[in-house]
Image (tube, rainbow, N blue to C red):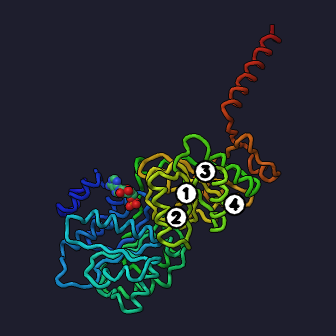
Amino acid sequence: MFEQFDLDSELLASIKELGYKKPTSIQDLVIPQAMKGNNIMASAPTGTGKTAAFLLPIAQHLLDYPRTKPGFPRVLILTPTRELAIQIGADSEQLTKLTNIKTGVITGGVNYGSHTDILTSTTDILVATPGRLLEYIENEQFDAREIEILVLDEADRMLDMGFVETINRIVAEARWRKQTMLFSATLEGAGVLRFAKEVLDEAVFLESNPSRKEKAVIHQWMHISDNSQHKLKLLVNLLKQEGVERTVVFANKRETVQYLSGKLYAEELPCVWLEGKMPQDKRNKAIERFKSGEIKVLVATDVAARGLDIVNITHVINFDMPRKVDIYIHRIGRTGRAGNKGTAISLVEAHDMAVIGKIERYTKERLSRRIIEELRPQHKESRVANKKAKVKLSTAQKKAKVKKQAKKKTKKTKAKK
Ligand code: AMP
């Protein structure tokens, strides 16, 4: 029950309106600690409700200690991507809509003028991507010294994206803060731990153990492939299969995203695509077409893996395997959100087997090997990697197999007689 947390009725009413019946496990862990004012370091898999876990205590703090004069934001939430910043901004507005708390979002990729309002009028909660915010700090358009609570969301990702210097400078500017919360999908990497040590004093270490219902049910398997062309044929085949509805296809490079989009159109598979260097308006449009269901396939680089809160993604297909396990985990986390079932299919070349081994060790599960009969891998290495693969037969093939077996049986019985 959310009532146990001592939240004001305005917040409880918004929670009810959003349809949240009871706190998720990360919320159960984080909210009481955050409300005590403790520094927090938490691992939270995607889609388990971590946003509300930090937004609710933040909102309660602002209600408990109302501002006495206009000024700069009192809460700063840093996120790795624009989409995630926009999403958190929207969540914050929803949760605080019955209060006077004001939320603002600052990201790169948009006109400088569009932030004038946030920079010149009073905003309480600011959600920002690090690069643009630091620019405003350096130009003295923004003062981080009024920040009381700092949240570093998806810290592992921000480090991966090379934001460490920028964040360190913003963190130093926000030196009068009273509380810092760091969220990361995993707390395993040495990078995150080292970084956390620098920005967090005496943090409470919280590791959520999502219940089965919260945990995504993701069916995972892989197809061994000979090369890129083979992968393309597999992709087209998969996308044309029944039940493959809303699918995100991941590629490692921008060029591959473009190449694939063209090929899919040629196969009469309309898609939208998303990659890092795209202008914001184009990006928003692509997301919108995919979100609305107008287009069923989104081809993207990893930039899209973060922050996109699109529900009902049925399939994630790794056209390219990521090089790191945590990226794999983030990618497949796009499907099977909030207890829905999802499917993650990886197209794997012989040189990807090392990362497959790592993924299997990390998830403690073996990725099953599947084959589409008419697209069997041909290379010797692929065949070796492919031992014990399950063959996926078409209905016609299945019927033929049953017939053959029946025939064999009759023959045997006859022979006995
Ligand atoms: P997040 O991990 O913050 O991205 O949240 C994932 C999804 O779960 C979002 O769509 C939230 O609106 C939703 N959510 C967050 N908290 C709860 C809750 N207590 N009950 C049900 N849904 C929730």
Secondary structure found at label 3: loop
Real-space CA distance between mark 3 and mark 4, rounded to the nearest whole angstrom? 32 Å
The mark closer to the camera, 2 or 3, is: 3
Q: Tag 3: residue type?
A: Leu
Q: Tag 1: residue type?
A: Leu
Q: Tag 2: residue type?
A: Ala
Q: Nearer the viewer, residue 225 or 267?
A: 267
Real-space CA distance between mark 1 and mark 4, rounded to the nearest whole angstrom? 27 Å
Return the residue at label 3.
269
Q: Say which label, 2 or 3, has the lower sequence index.
A: 3
Return the residue at label 1.
298
Q: Are marks 2 and 3 in contact (CB under 8 Å)?
A: no
Q: Say which label, 2 or 4, has the lower sequence index.
A: 2
Q: Nearer the viewer, residue 235 or 223?
A: 235
Q: Are marks 2 and 1 in contact (CB under 8 Å)?
A: yes
Please tell me in which quarter of the rendered image ligand 1 is found.
Answer: bottom left
Return the residue at label 2.
304
Can residue 337 be seen here? The reply is: yes
Q: Tag 4: residue type?
A: Ala
Q: Which mark is residue 354?
A: 4
Q: Position of residue 196 (x, y in %)?
A: 45, 77
* Quadrant in the picture for residue 208: bottom left
How crowded is the residue under tag 2: few (<14 C-alpha within 10 Å), some, or many (20+)? Answer: many
Q: Say which label, 2 or 1, has the lower sequence index.
A: 1
Real-space CA distance between mark 2 and mark 4, rounded to the nearest whole angstrom? 25 Å
Q: Nearer the viewer, residue 212 or 277?
A: 277
Q: Position of residue 177 (x, y in %)?
A: 31, 82
Q: Position of residue 164 (x, y in %)?
A: 50, 81
How crowded is the residue under tag 1: few (<14 C-alpha within 10 Å), some, or many (20+)? Answer: many
Secondary structure found at label 2: helix
Q: Is residue 5 left or right of residue 131?
A: left
Can residue 45 be seen here? The reply is: no
